[in-house]
Image: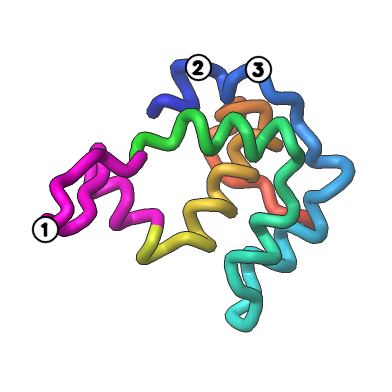
Amino acid sequence: ASMCTTKCGGLPSQAEERKEKLTKACTSWTTDWLKVWKLFSTEELRWFKNNYPAEEQEADADEATIHYKMAMHTAKEVSKKELLCLTLFTIDDECVKWPYIRLAQ
């Protein structure tokens, strides 16, 4: 929802440059999240790290690590590749200009 309301931080679409690589990586069962992570531009990485609501919170030394919006952190860890794919497809589709994900043909 935040991506939609902030229009992806004004990030430009890179669909022309990476749509085929992104589609291949995101639809492959054997590709891990790191290949998708490497498709992010420097600006996109900065925006993602600054805007994804799951930053670590201070805790006492004897307490477990907690994150702001723990459910968002859990979703990122459980489905990291899918989350990263969805993020890049959303940016490349001009931040929800279409009602569906447009894969490479």
Mark nearest the camera among 3 and 1 is 1
Name the N-terminal-most of marks 3 and 1. 3
Identify the amino acid type marked 2.
Thr
- Residue 62 is tagged as 1
Identify the amino acid type marked 1.
Asp
Across and down, in percent, residue 51 comes to: 47, 29
Kindly report the distance in space between the C-alpha atoms of the residues bearing marks 3 and 1: 41 Å
Which residue occupies the foreground of this view, 55 or 22?
Answer: 55
Which quadrant holds the N terminus?
Answer: top left
Which residue occupies the foreground of this view, 63 or 66?
Answer: 63
Residue at the farthest right position: 17
- Residue 6 is tagged as 2
Across and down, in percent, residue 18 comes to: 82, 49
Which secondary structure lies at badge 2? loop
Badge 3 density bin: few <14, some 14–19, many ≥20, Cα 10 Å: few
| Contact flag, marks 2 and 3 (Cβ < 8 Å) | no
The residue carrying mark 3 is: 10
Q: Is residue 73 above or below residue 90?
A: below
Kindly report the distance in space between the C-alpha atoms of the residues bearing marks 1 and 2: 38 Å
Across and down, in percent, residue 86 comes to: 54, 48
Which secondary structure lies at badge 1? loop
Q: Which contiguous range is marked in magenta?
A: 55-76
Identify the amino acid type marked 3.
Gly
Which quadrant holds the C terminus?
Answer: bottom right
Residue located 16% across and 58% down the image: 64
Which secondary structure lies at badge 3? helix
Mark nearest the camera among 1 and 2 is 1
Numbered circles on residues, count = 3
Name the N-terminal-most of marks 1 and 2. 2
Where residue 2 sits, quadrant-wise, is top left
